[in-house]
Image (cartoon, grey):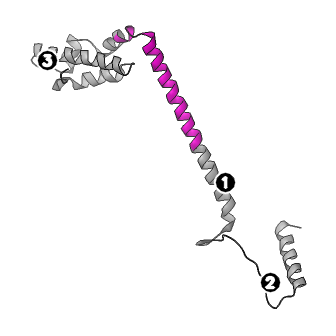
Amino acid sequence: MGKVPAGLEGYYREIAAALPCSGRRKQKYLSDLRERLCMLENEVPVANYEAAQMYIGPVEEIVESWKDNLSVDDLSCRIRFKRRTKVLLTAAALVAVTILMLLGGFYIKYQDSAHGDFVVDEIIVTKPDDMSESDYKQYWKQQLDEYWGK
C-alpha cells in the first residue's frame, strides 16, 4: 500500500468521502484506488485531479460502480448505523431537555429564597422578648393569612 500521490489527494478524499460502506470493505476499495493512483502517477508526468478523472473516471462514476458491487449486508449495515446514530442523537436530545427542565424547575422553586447576593437557606423565627405568647401566635396567624390571601 503506497501513499496517495501529491497531486491526487483531492480526488482520493472525494471518493473516500462518497463511499457508502465502512470498515474493511472501504479500506479494500481505498487501497485499490491508491494503487491505481500510483500507477497513474507513473504513467502520466503531471498527475492531477483532471488527469485522474480522465484516466480513472469521474468520482460519481467510480462511486456508482462500487455501489453496484456492494452486498446486501454492507448496505444493511450502513442503514443500521444511520438508524443507530439517529436513536443516539434523539436520546441525547431528550437527556439535554430533561436536564434543562430540571434546572428550570429548581430555579423557579428557589428563586423566592434569593435575596440580593445571598440565598435564604432556612428561616428560624423566634419570639421577641417583649411579646407575649398569645400576641406572637396572633401576629403569625395574621402574617400567614396575608400571605395565603385569606
Magenta stretch: give its range: 66-95
Please state the horizontal and vertical placement of residue 142, each as a whole percent of the image.
87, 76
Q: What's under tag 1, amino acid-wise?
A: Gly
Q: CA distance from mark 1 to mark 2?
A: 34 Å
- Most foreground residue, 25 or 5: 25
* Image position of 27 (left or right of 9): right
Q: Which residue is mark 1?
A: 105
**Residue 32 lies in what quarter of the image?**
top left
Q: Secondary structure at mark 2?
A: loop
Q: Which residue position holds label 2?
A: 127
The x, y position of residue 45, in whole percent, is 9, 17
Badge 1 crowding class, 10 Å Cα cut-off, few under 14, some 14 to 19, many 20 or more, is: few
Q: Residue at x 60, y 44 (%)?
A: 97
Residue 133's place in the image compared with 31, above or below, is below
User: The N terminus is located in which quarter?
Assistant: top left
The answer to whether residue 124 is left or right of residue 56 is: right
Tell me, yes or no, whether the highlighted magenta stretch contains residue 40: no
Tell me the distance, in whole angstroms, between the alpha carbons under discs 3 and 2. 95 Å
Q: Which residue: 13% across, 17% down?
A: 41
Give the SS element for disc 1.
helix
